[in-house]
Amino acid sequence: MSKGPGLFSDIGKKARDLLTKDYIFDQKLSISTYSDTGVALTSTAVKKGGLSTGDVGAQYKYKNTLIDVKVDTGSNILTTLTLNDIVPSTKTIASLKFPDYSSGKLEVQYYHHHAAFSTAVSLNQSPTADLSVTLGTPTFAIGAEASYDTAGGKLAKYTAGISVTKPDSCAAIILGDKGDTIKASYIHHLDEVKKTAAVGEITRRFSTNENTFTVGGSYAVDNLTILKLKLNNHGKLGALLQHELIPKSLLTISSEFDTKALDKTPRFGVALAFKP
């Protein structure tokens, strides 16, 4: 575990990742290569329905500086500059998208043994300021985040959360949507390498009096293959199979079924990621 409580976005992240990460319902192909100068190149193509998109990205790391440039088929250029330890224990991230200059953002993160702070400001005429604070240790953390709209002069969102983390499990409670939603999750790892796990998550929305309960898990079939399943009380069943074809290169097949409407066409997705 890390030396501090981590950022607020880390609260509940392990359970959230098991239930959502790598589930894809499109066709995606990505190929990565590395040049002799240390530049990492990644080409990605995605087919969603009848629409195909793609992008090419280049990433270069020099000492404490990381430069990431991505160009997509819509002629958009996204540039991200990450600087580590300009001030000890800090990370500064600046991003700018051309030609949409108003999408620029500047973020500063600070890490301490018992606290983590993050502040971000959008670079436009009516900037939005985001601030998150987490206090605690790697075992116990409590935090909050808020977003302030300078144009309207009011809070756009505020969220609070708490988590308890042990070597083989993690529990979290998050109060979000300006107090309208509460979410509790628990994940328990069943092996030392943390590839086999069980997870449960319940979400209640007070304004609609609606509850959503989801259970899921992952199972390491062997050293190269992982199977994931999830099911919620609305009858949505998701399944994912991920296999390492060659070292670092993954084939992912995922699907989702509505068990209460089997006449509907299930959703399927395939992703191929090749890395050297």
Image (cartoon, helix red, strand yellow):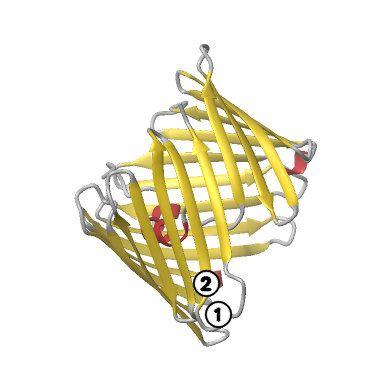
Q: Residues within 10 Å of mark 1 (few under 14, many from 20)?
A: few
Between 91 and 11, the one nearer to me in the picture: 11
- Left-right relation of 231 to 206: left
Q: Is residue 143 something one can see in this rendering?
A: yes
Task: Give the percent coordinates (x, y) of residue 249.
Answer: 44, 36
Q: Residue furthest bottom?
A: 209
Residue 13 in which image quadrant: bottom left
Point out the image quarter for the C terminus. Answer: top left
The image's mark for residue 262 is: 1
| Residue at 58% over, 41% down | 29
Q: Is residue 194 above or below residue 98?
A: below
At 57% from the left and 86% from the top, the residue drawn is 208
**Mark 1 and mark 2: Cα distance apart in space:** 7 Å
Q: Which mark is residue 110?
A: none
Q: Amino acid at mark 1?
A: Leu
Badges 1 and 2: C-beta atoms under 8 Å apart?
yes
As helix, strand or loop, the secondary structure at mark 2 comes to strand
In the displayed structure, does residue 83 sit left or right of residue 6? right
Q: Secondary structure at mark 1?
A: loop
Q: Residue at x 38, y 33 (%)?
A: 247
- Report the quarter where the N terminus lies: top left
Q: Quadrant of residue 148 in the image?
A: bottom right
Amino acid at dot 2 = Phe
Q: Residues within 10 Å of mark 2 (few under 14, many from 20)?
A: some
The answer to whether 107 is drawn above or below residue 234 in the figure is above
Q: Residue 7, can we see it?
A: no
Residue at x 34% of width, y 48% of height: 225
Residue named by callout 2: 257
Q: Position of residue 66 (x, y in %)?
A: 52, 26
Q: Residue 125: horizontal and vertical position, in percent?
A: 78, 46
On the image, the x and y values in percent for residue 117 come to 44, 46
Q: How many marks?
A: 2
